[in-house]
Image (cartoon, rainbow, N blue to C red):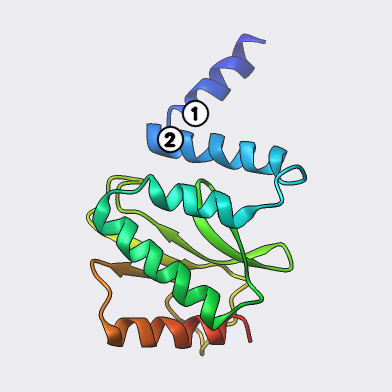
Amino acid sequence: MKGKQKTAKSASAKFTDEERAAIKEYVREKKGRADHADGEKDVLAKIAEMPKSDREMAERLHTLIKATAPDLTPRTWYGMPAYAKDGNVVCFFQSGQKFKTRYATLGFSDKANLDEGAMWPSAYALTKLTAADQARIGALVKKAVS
């Protein structure tokens, strides 16, 4: 019994406090998914918790993703705003504060149809959103759900 406990402790010691919090958030999301049908409300609440610069980007991305791909369902994923198709996350926004990084991230899961050759980006660092960035993101989201 002690060996198993030690193994579990040493495994959890490899995660940062932020990573452990994200995992706990994910477990809460999975437990509450059936009872919590209003994913957009959850996404907007997570966006509201973000620092101002990330919050402004997340709000603009939320509007852009909903307009570009209205079939995507807003939900949280590891405590981050995410957008799913048929229950599978396609893309997500990660505040820079989430894991104490210097930039926010727009990421795409393996469910996104972005495959191009043998290598393609699946995450983009964001420090601000220009009109050109928004147009590029809109095209990526459209391709991701195609």
Quarter of the image that includes the N terminus = top right
Image location of residue 48, percent across then percent down: 39, 49
Q: Which of 109 and 51 is in front in this view?
A: 51
- The answer to whether 73 appears left or right of 121 in the picture is right
Image location of residue 4, percent across then percent down: 63, 18
Q: What residue is shown with label 1?
A: 12
The image quarter containing residue 40 is: bottom right
- Local crowd at mark 2 within 10 Å, few (<14), some, or many (≥20)? few
Quarter of the image that includes the C terminus = bottom right
- The residue shown at (43%, 33%) is 14
Image location of residue 61, percent across then percent down: 41, 70
Amino acid type for the residue under numbered disc 1: Ser
Q: What residue is shown with label 2?
A: 15
- The answer to whether 91 appears left or right of 14 in the picture is right
User: Disc 1 and disc 2: Cα gap in Å?
Assistant: 6 Å
Total marks in image: 2
Can the viewer see residue 125 in this picture?
yes
- The answer to whether 28 appears left or right of 82 in the picture is right
| Residue 63 to residue 82: above or below | below
The image quarter containing residue 28 is: top right
- The residue shown at (70%, 40%) is 32
| Residue 108 to residue 9: above or below | below
Label 1–label 2 contact, CB within 8 A: yes
Label drawn at residue 20:
none
Image location of residue 123, percent across then percent down: 41, 69
- The residue shown at (26%, 53%) is 52
Amino acid type for the residue under numbered disc 2: Phe
User: What kind of element bears circle 1?
Assistant: helix
Single out the residue that lies furthest toward the top.
Answer: 2
- The residue shown at (49%, 40%) is 22
- The answer to whether 31 appears left or right of 60 in the picture is right
